[in-house]
Amino acid sequence: MYYYILAPQKGKAYIRQEKIKDILGDLGIAGETVSPSPARTIEELTHLGVIKGYSTIVAVGPEGLANKVITVLASQKTAKNVVLGIIPDNFDSVIAQKIGVKDLYSACNALKERRLETMDICQIEPNKFFLTEAIVESFRNQEVYFSIDNLKGKVMVNRIVIKPGLEIFFHDKSLEGSTPSRFFRWLFGKKQVDIFSSNFRTKRVRLESQNNLPVKVSGEIVAKMPVTINNRSRILKIIVARDKIKTKN
């Protein structure tokens, strides 16, 4: 029933994974465990789990691993009924907060209790998906052109954050002021209204830049501008903790 994809075992990660296996065994939900290698990627292992007919595929490790598993599940028609479970390696991460787990035991116990939610994910056309967030970042402000339905515009930004639900945040570094002025605001405890950022929600957006800025998910470049990003509403079936605090997707 459960098919576990574990991040490569190195140093302390090996000890942690052995502890996870012990907890899963005690809870009665042990299953097949696999890890990526030069011979088999995360995507290939996920595809193999789908072919084998597993109803639940569990990503054990960092957010990047989970997003790669999600990309396969969202791309394959044969995986539409497969449920995703996650045991994060960082319980302060976005993904841990989304599923409402706070430590190894609560993450493993959530798998046993099997409370399901359907969540939004984002698609970077043609075939990249993520549950966390995508980031476009530059040291200096860059001209970025955006298209939403029939609306087109241009912004000067040094940072763009894209979250599921297709919530988009633009940050304009030039409005922050000089380094000395920021220092003195901090030194004297002066709070300033955030006039540097703007955000909006949409269902589909196209972003372009002259410098083909990279788009990163979990620290990895997954695309370069121009990109088209869609919100895929409530298509990911995922296991969450029973006492999960509601958060925005």
Image (tube, rainbow, N blue to C red):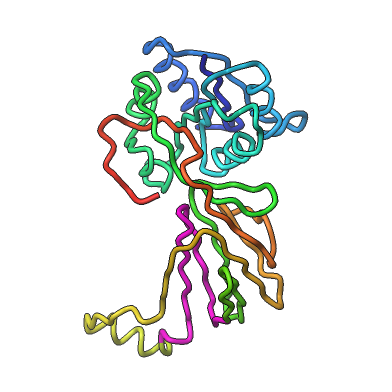
Foreground residue among 143 and 187: 143
| Above or below 36: residue 193 | below
Q: Position of residue 195 (x, y in %)?
A: 36, 82
- Residue 78, by quadrant, is top right
Q: Where is residue 123 in the image (x, y as percent from the top left)?
A: 59, 51
Is 215 within the magenta?
A: no
Foreground residue among 62 and 122: 122
Foreground residue among 70 and 137: 70
Q: Position of residue 153 (x, y in %)?
A: 57, 80
Q: Main secondary structure of the magenta part?
A: strand
Is 167 within the magenta?
A: yes
Q: Give the range drawn in magenta.
A: 154-176
At x 47%, y 29%, the residue is 85
Residue at the far front: name it. 150
At x 57%, y 30%, the residue is 80
Residue at the far left: name it. 189
